[in-house]
Image: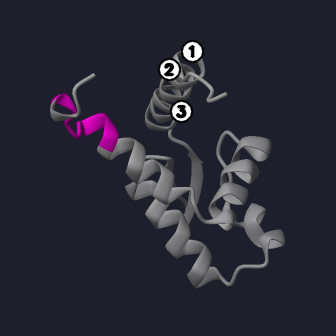
Amino acid sequence: MDFNEIKITETDNELSNFARAIAIPIRVSIIRAILLNGPWVSPDVFVNLGLNPVTRERHLKSMVFSGIVKEKHHNRKTYYSIDEQGFFKLVNEFDDLFSYFKTHWVKPE
């Protein structure tokens, strides 16, 4: 492959944004908490993570903006869920990238 042919694609940007969005361990814990307690969870689920409400809200808002988590409002409370469409699309794109690496990479001897 000629390196002059390599271009940054929209998928590359999406994967990079996704990786940055989950690069903070507390965000991985938030995803795990939603997956284990979902499909929709209240902020009470995150109490055991030891975050103050402002910090928790900042992380959740960032994850909503990144398309990893979605939110809905009901009776003055916000509930969170995994954004299946965005999350699994990005997970599959990472899987494709790593699968290509696994099948095409020649290990140095």
Instruction: Categorize mark 2 by other alpha carbons within 10 Å: few (<14), some (14-19), many (20+).
Output: few
Q: Residue furthest front?
A: 109
Q: How is the image coloured?
A: one colour
Element at label 3: helix
**Which is nearer the N-term, disc 2 or disc 3?**
3
**Which residue bears the numbered disc 2?**
100
Q: Which residue type carries mark 3? A: Val
Instruction: Categorize mark 3 by other alpha carbons within 10 Å: few (<14), some (14-19), many (20+).
Output: few
Confirm or deny contact between disc 3 and disc 1 (CB under 8 A). no
Q: Name the image quarter holding the N terminus.
A: top left
**Residue, x 41% and y 42% (percent of image)?**
15
Picture coordinates of residue 29, whole percent (x, y): 73, 58
The region drawn magenta spans: 5-12
| Numbered badge on residue 103 | 1
**Residue, x 55% and y 73% (percent of image)?**
57
- Can residue 36 be found in the magenta stretch? no
Front residue (pair 106, 90): 106
Front residue (pair 55, 11): 11
Confirm or deny contact between disc 2 and disc 3 (CB under 8 A). no
**Which is nearer the N-term, disc 3 or disc 1?**
3
**Residue, x 72% and y 42% (percent of image)?**
35
Q: Which residue type carries mark 2? A: Tyr
Q: Is residue 87 above or below residue 56?
A: above
Q: CA distance from mark 3 to mark 1?
A: 18 Å
| Numbered badge on residue 91 | 3
Report whether 75 appears left or right of 2. right
